[in-house]
Image (tube, rainbow, N blue to C red):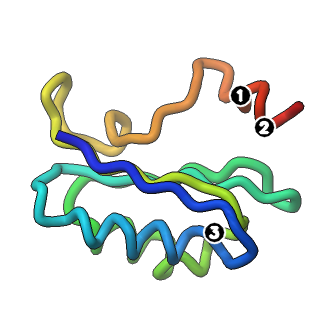
Amino acid sequence: MCGIVGYVGREQAAPILLDGLEHLEYRGYDSAGIAVLSEKSGLQVKKSKGRLKVLSALVDGGRAVDGVLGIGHTRWATHGEPNDVNSHPHLSEDSALPWFITG
């Protein structure tokens, strides 16, 4: 079982994504991650094994990740062991951005 939230707007996305994931916390999961896109920093993906508080600490409550577009994802391991590498979201092998973002 997974939970996914997204945000596009004018405010910083990471704190909003973390808040959205917090509302999904009751569903049970073993890892969480966020992917945020900014003009300045490009695509930033931060993910961690464990509860949401581990991810939140990693990104300083979202303050360490800038950008106004992003997704948040929790994962309940049904395939592969729960660890930082298997945490979602995943990138393509070449870490390319989808065509709809790069235009």
Helix, strand or loop status at disc 1: loop
Frontmost residue, 97 versus 81: 97
Identify the residue under disc 3.
Answer: 65
Identify the residue under disc 2.
Answer: 101
Q: For the residue marked with disc 1, what is the amino acid? A: Pro
Identify the residue under disc 1.
Answer: 98
In the rendered image, the quadrant that contains the N terminus is top left
- First reached walking from the N terminus: tag 3 or tag 2: 3
Residue 95 image offset from top left, x and y in percent: 66, 28
Question: Tags 1 and 2 in contact by the CB under 8 Å rule?
Answer: yes
Q: How far apart are marks 3 and 2 (CA)?
A: 18 Å
Q: For the residue marked with disc 3, what is the amino acid? A: Val
* Label 3 CA crowd tier, 10 Å (few <14, some 14–19, many 20+): many
The single residue placed furthest to the front in the displayed view is 9
Residue at the location (38% across, 69% down)?
20
Q: Residue 40 lies in what quarter of the image?
A: bottom right
Q: How far apart are marks 1 and 2 (CA)?
A: 6 Å
Q: For the residue marked with disc 2, what is the amino acid? A: Ile
Residue at the location (16% across, 35% down)?
77
Query: Left or right of 66: which side holds 39?
Result: right
- First reached walking from the N terminus: tag 3 or tag 1: 3
* Label 1 CA crowd tier, 10 Å (few <14, some 14–19, many 20+): few
Helix, strand or loop status at disc 2: helix
